[in-house]
Image: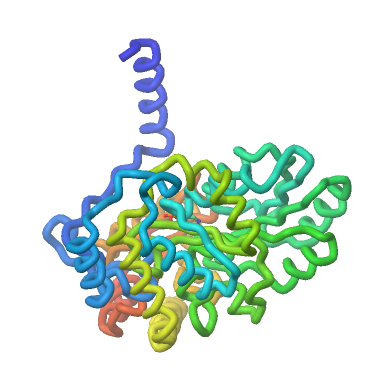
């Protein structure tokens, strides 16, 4: 390799090692579930997005196995060449039905969907107004668009309104928000966002990755949660969290919008089609997610149980109802030390520290699943109780 490039990378890695430390991926053994195997230990898993527990659902797994046998692993072609199978079409129809939209289009991931929508739908005469805490994939997708860009302070809809008022000369204005924000677990204020979109003749894009399957009576997401199904212009989401946890993303909305994406969206056109077993697994997961509201009831009960216990033990927990539970452990390395203490007690949870979150906002983010048993959640809460010694020493 070119030595000047290699030297620069070496220097930057050395600096990073000193400043933020280098990320090291945890290697997990065995299948995704309410517990995970790590280094020969079985840990209670509070660090996955498998909110409904469908990643280990026997029906989901059997349907994927049948598809593997009948259709093979992959299609070795893009959707616009020979890669489209009947199951891709059926999955798109099923996503649209779940979301209450006219149509939907699949991507390899929600990251890809977010990279693909802005460039396809907007041009230089348009304006994007984006929440400051939107997911990295939205930020990158917006960068790829030729539109003008404004960022409004997180959840500050007065700031959003100012930006909308400032951009009255735009051909289109597109408001962009996560449905549920992954760091705080807070839900976007969709009623007021819809009202502002209507008042300023703006379109609204919601990335519902953490809400699809989780929020709303049928798991349709943030819009259904607020009784606003059909009011979001562009909905993006993932199949890699509540809907089976494998991989895949989508954009859903009006027929013409989805057709435009099929015609011009680069991460849809210039990549391999989703592997059929994954598409079949997602179809099964959507059927289960819609048909078994008791999974969402169990998820809500599990979330309330763990939240309540942490509050009883005196922890600062950001308010909310989503299964993302941010336990605030502000300053220094407290969050990391508590995460290490939890691990010692058989609980897997990650500390989020600077620069992932602002200094002073350090936390452990817990993610609850419908598949956790009360005993597993109580074990986790007990581990937090015993970790209070770490706080005392901090
Ligand atoms: C809000 C949000 N959008 C998009 C993504 C990316 O989803 P995918 O894993 O399907 O690329 C994530 C996952 O981290 C997310 O949290």
Counting from the top left corner in percent of width and height, residue 261 is at: 57, 51
Identity of the residue drawn at 47% across and 54% down: 110
Q: Nearer the viewer, residue 92 or 224?
A: 92
Counting from the top left corner in percent of width and height, residue 278 is at: 31, 61
Considering the image in quadrants, where does the N terminus appear? top left
Identity of the residue drawn at 57% across and 47% down: 263
Q: Nearer the viewer, residue 258 or 299?
A: 258
Q: Is residue 312 visible?
A: no
Counting from the top left corner in percent of width and height, residue 25 is at: 29, 46
Counting from the top left corner in percent of width and height, residue 144 is at: 60, 38
**Furthest residue toward top:** 3
With respect to residue 76, does 192 lie above or below? below
**Picture quarter containing residue 102?**
bottom right
With respect to residue 390, does 165 lie above or below? above
Considering the image in quadrants, where does the C terminus appear? bottom left
Q: How many marks?
A: 0
Q: Nearer the viewer, residue 308 or 61?
A: 61
Colour theme: rainbow
With respect to residue 376, does 297 lie above or below? below
Q: Nearer the viewer, residue 195 or 371?
A: 195
Q: Is residue 338 left or right of residue 199?
A: left
Identity of the residue drawn at 59% across and 55% down: 259
**Picture quarter containing residue 36?**
bottom left
**Furthest residue toward left:** 40
Q: Is residue 353 visible?
A: yes
Q: Is residue 109 left or right of residue 266?
A: left
């Amino acid at each position: 390799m070119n030595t000047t490039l290699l030297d620069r990378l070496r220097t930057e890695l050395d600096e990073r090692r000193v400043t933020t430390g280098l990320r090291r991926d945890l290697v997990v053994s065995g299948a995704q579930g309410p517990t995970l195997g790590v280094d020969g230990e079985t840990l209670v898993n509070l660090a996955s997005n498998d909110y409904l527990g469908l990643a280990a659902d026997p029906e989901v797994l059997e349907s994927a196995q049948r598809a593997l046998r009948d259709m093979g692993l992959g299609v070795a072609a893009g959707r616009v060449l020979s890669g489209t199978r009947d199951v891709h079409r059926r999955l798109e129809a099923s996503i649209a039905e779940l979301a209450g939209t006219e149509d939907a289009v699949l991507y390899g991931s929600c990251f890809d969907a977010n990279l693909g929508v802005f460039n396809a739908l907007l041009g230089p005469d348009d304006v994007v107004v984006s929440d400051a805490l939107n997911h990295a994939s939205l930020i990158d997708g917006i960068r790829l668009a030729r539109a003008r860009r404004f960022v409004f302070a997180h959840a500050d809809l007065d700031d959003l309104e100012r930006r909308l008022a400032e951009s009255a000369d735009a051909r289109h204005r597109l408001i962009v928000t996560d449905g549920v924000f992954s760091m705080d677990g807070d839900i976007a204020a969709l009623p007021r966002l819809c009202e502002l979109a209507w008042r300023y003749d703006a379109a609204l894009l919601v990335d519902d990755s953490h809400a699809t399957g989780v929020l709303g009576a049928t798991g349709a997401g943030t819009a259904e949660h607020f009784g606003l199904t059909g009011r979001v212009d562009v909905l993006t989401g993932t199949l890699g969290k509540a809907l089976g946890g494998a991989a895949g993303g989508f954009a859903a909305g009006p027929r013409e919008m989805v057709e435009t994406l099929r015609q011009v969206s680069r991460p849809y056109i210039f990549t391999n089609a989703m592997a059929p077993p994954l598409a079949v697994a997602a179809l099964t997961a959507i059927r289960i997610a819609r048909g078994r509201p008791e999974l969402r009831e169990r998820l809500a009960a599990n979330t309330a149980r763990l939240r309540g216990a942490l509050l009883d033990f005196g922890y600062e927990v950001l308010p909310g109802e989503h299964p993302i539970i941010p336990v605030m452990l502000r300053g220094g390395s407290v969050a990391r030390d508590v995460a290490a203490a939890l691990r010692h007690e058989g609980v897997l949870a990650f500390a989020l520290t600077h620069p992932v979150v602002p200094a002073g906002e350090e936390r452990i983010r817990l993610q609850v699943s419908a598949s956790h048993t009360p005993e597993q959640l109580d074990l986790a809460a007990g581990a937090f109780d015993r970790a209070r010694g770490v706080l005392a020493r901090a």
